[in-house]
Amino acid sequence: MGKLTTGATGMNSRARRAAVRIGLALMALAATVALAACGSGIEQPPAQAAGTGNGNRVKIEDKPSGEVTISNWPLYIDKQTVPDFEKETGVSVHYIEDVNSNEEFFAKMQPLLAEGKSGGRSLMIVTDWMAKKMHEFGYLQEFEPAGLINFEKNLVTNLRGVSYDPGRNFAAPWQSGMTGLIVNKELAPEVHTICDLFNPKYKGKVDMLNELRDTVPLVMKCMGIDPEKATEADWMKAIEKIKGAAESGQIRRFTGNDYSTDLTNGNAVAVIGWSGDAVQLQADNPNLEFRMPKEGCILWSDNMVIPVGAPNPTAAEAFINYVYDPVHQAQIEAYVNYVSPVEGTKEVLLKKEPEIANNKLIFPPPSFTKNCSIQPTPSPEEERNINKAFNAVLNG
């Protein structure tokens, strides 16, 4: 489909991408529910079973060459970046769209990673909390800064120094996003806070995400709890509030990206949703819009990581460095419509795609996200208990 345009053709492209994402989200949800039903969880393996990545730094050659295999989420890159990279570097890229959910992908890869193998992959894209967990398990290598000049120079300020990787030693943001409210402003004009989702006026017309780290922290914000400082008891209070709303019928259902269908057909008037989806939905229906909750949003990033056993880390770092060039990043950003992690991208798009460059969901000003929090990361023991409680609500 290539780069989006700003007219009717661009809107149709967005609509087609949204439709495919919904189908993929349903598959991912099915996989996640199946994992929960089997009683599996992502727990710390015995020390002797862990990989060998902790403390190991990528060793790079002078010049990238050969082949590289990349695992990413579906529909998360334009059609030209990979062939352009191949042409510029001479590296042959095997690009796989096989990350449908963090849990599903981890379950597939963990047996290999625990043996110091990567399944032939040199680069994977996973969300913040999963990058943290994989590093704790010893499954990731740390970057060689000499191969990442653009990354070191152009990473946006607000993504530097994150709590789980203060030096950005192993996780390079691919795209970022915001979790907040997507509202039909004609049918639910009063919804401006997460607490408004519990208003009986909207009973049966509210969707919440089945993602623990998005929905529960937002409800904690509604309750006056800082998610980044929350105790296990705080998590449980929020889950109990969600449980009550689900049992009363206030919440219509828990969804992945398929909340898009509920919004477009009127079954839902307000949902917890993702900023990039809102950009696409509003292109087709001006009544649908992302609203920053008064409590603030949840911020997240999907990150490029280099696993243990990666066969060509030199080419992996070359790819990271390539997409951190603002010109190359602008090409990606014009397609995916999430939040760019690369400084200078907006300036490139102002000349080529001003509609995208001026969209605060794609380039949010600090004032817009001032009350937002990053996805919290409870301890392994807390996570097991919290997951169990939340899954009981989802499957109740």
Image: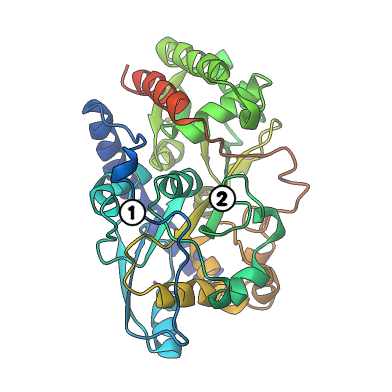
As shown in the figure, which amino acid type bears the numbered disc 2?
Gly
Mark 1 vs mark 2, CA separation in Å: 17 Å
The residue at 42%/63% (across/down) is 306
Q: Nearer the viewer, residue 249 or 213?
A: 213
Q: Nearer the viewer, mark 1 or mark 2?
A: 1
- Residue 307's x, y, as percent? 37, 60
State whether residue 7 appears in this view. no
- Residue 262's x, y, as percent? 41, 35
Q: Secondary structure at mark 2?
A: strand
Residue that lies at the very extreme toward the front in this rendered image: 48
Looking at the image, residue 314 lies above or below residue 285: below
Q: To which quarter of the image does residue 69 belong?
A: bottom left
Q: Nearer the viewer, residue 18 or 71?
A: 71
N-terminal-most mark, 1 or 2: 1
State whether residue 86 appears in this view. yes
Q: To which quarter of the image does residue 145 belong?
A: bottom right
- Residue 377's x, y, as percent? 53, 35
- Determine which residue is flagged by label 2: 177
- Determine which residue is flagged by label 1: 99
The residue at 56%/29% (across/down) is 217
As shown in the figure, which amino acid type bears the numbered disc 1?
Val
